[in-house]
Amino acid sequence: MIRHLVLFKLNDGVAKDEPRVRAGAEAFAGLGKQIDELREWQCGWNLTVRDIAYDYAINSLVDDVEALQTYLAHPAHQAGVALWREFATWVIADIEV
């Protein structure tokens, strides 16, 4: 199993209540039901306010590297990434569990 973790940081001057940011969060919220390879899917906004904190997180689980690649290439995932690319940066970690 592979745990796929992503932390997003909104670009300077971008607020989470902007329509484009809300659209990005909504796009990711629905992925768990759209992509069969996702065994677990959690995403949401960070609750703490700290300079070092990221703003939004994804925590997901897939069976193997092949399932991860299928998820990453899925059109719904790519559409969400395209939205987030406009207003945020992110870091990723894929760990074997």
Image: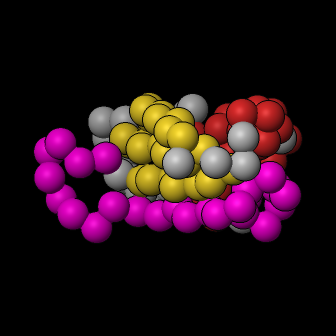
Q: Quadrant of residue 42?
A: bottom right
Q: What's the residue at 43%, 43% (across, down)?
A: 8
Q: What's the residue at 33%, 61% (across, down)?
A: 46
Q: In the rendered view, how is the structure colored?
A: secondary structure
Outermost residue to the left: 51
Q: Position of residue 87 (x, y in %)?
A: 48, 37
Q: Please indicate, yes or no, whether residue 59 appears anywhere in the rendered image.
A: yes
Look at the image and give the residue range highlighted in magenta.
Answer: 31-54
Q: What's the residue at 50%, 39% (across, down)?
A: 95
The foreground one among 21 and 33 is 33
Side of 53 where 73 appears, left or right: right
Side of 53 where 37 appears, left or right: right
Q: Position of residue 21 (x, y in %)?
A: 52, 52
Q: Position of residue 44 (x, y in %)?
A: 47, 64
Side of 29 where 4 appears, left or right: left
Q: Position of residue 40 (x, y in %)?
A: 64, 63
Q: Please indicate, yes or no, whether residue 79 appears anywhere in the rendered image.
A: no
The foreground one among 23 and 96 is 96
Indicate whether residue 43 is drawn in magenta: yes
How many badges with numbers are in the image?
A: 0
Q: What's the residue at 68%, 45% (across, down)?
A: 80
The foreground one among 67 and 92 is 67
Indicate whether residue 71 is drawn in magenta: no
